[in-house]
Image (spheres, rainbow, N blue to C red):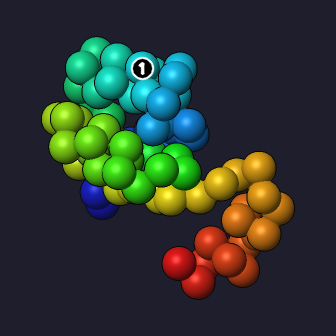
């Protein structure tokens, strides 16, 4: 049986504390298999993802909008 994948989910990853936390965690925690980065700005998200050493999955969502966090919406995307 394979072990479970360790995923770090970071919101606000395109600026401020979220971006700093993503970059710090990427360099300090080798045991993470994949990062899921959530942010609103596509251009900044692409820049952050290019700098990451781990496998990264970007999610462009504005979590302040309720429809962005509904299960139905997330499942459709």
Q: Quadrant of residue 73?
A: bottom right
Position of residue 55 measured from the top left corner of the image (x, y, whole percent): 23, 48
* Secondary structure state at the residue bearing disc 1: helix
Residue 65 in the figure: left or right of residue 25: right
- Res 21 quadrant in image: top left
The one of 8 and 67 positioned closer to us in this rendering: 67
Q: Residues within 10 Å of mark 1 (few under 14, many from 20)?
A: some
- Asked whether, in this view, residue 50 is left or right of residue 37, the answer is left
Q: How many labels sit on residues?
A: 1
Quarter residue 23 falls in: top left
| Residue 34 at x, y percent in the picture | 32, 46
Q: Which residue is mark 1?
A: 20
Instruction: Point out residue 5 in the picture as x, y percentages from the top left corner.
Output: 36, 50
User: In which quadrant will I find the N terminus?
Assistant: bottom left
Q: Is residue 22 visible?
A: yes
**For the view shown, which residue lies furthest in the right direction?**
66
Tell me which residue sits at (28%, 57%) in the image: 2
- The residue depicted at 48 percent of the width and 50 percent of the height is 41
Q: Is residue 12 left or right of residue 33?
A: right
Residue at 47% over, 37% down: 13
**Rendered residue at 73%/62% (across/down):** 69
Look at the image and tell me whether residue 4 can be seen.
Answer: no
Q: Is residue 14 above or below residue 56?
A: above
Percent coordinates x, y for residue 37 in the rendering: 44, 46
């Amino acid at each position: 049986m394979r072990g479970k994948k360790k995923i770090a989910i970071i919101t606000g990853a395109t600026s401020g504390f979220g971006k700093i936390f993503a970059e710090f965690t990427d360099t300090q925690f080798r045991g993470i298999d994949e990062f899921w980065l959530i942010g609103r700005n596509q251009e900044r998200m692409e820049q952050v993802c290019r700098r990451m050493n781990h496998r990264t999955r970007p999610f462009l969502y504005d979590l302040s909008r309720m429809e962005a966090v509904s299960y139905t919406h997330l499942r459709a995307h």
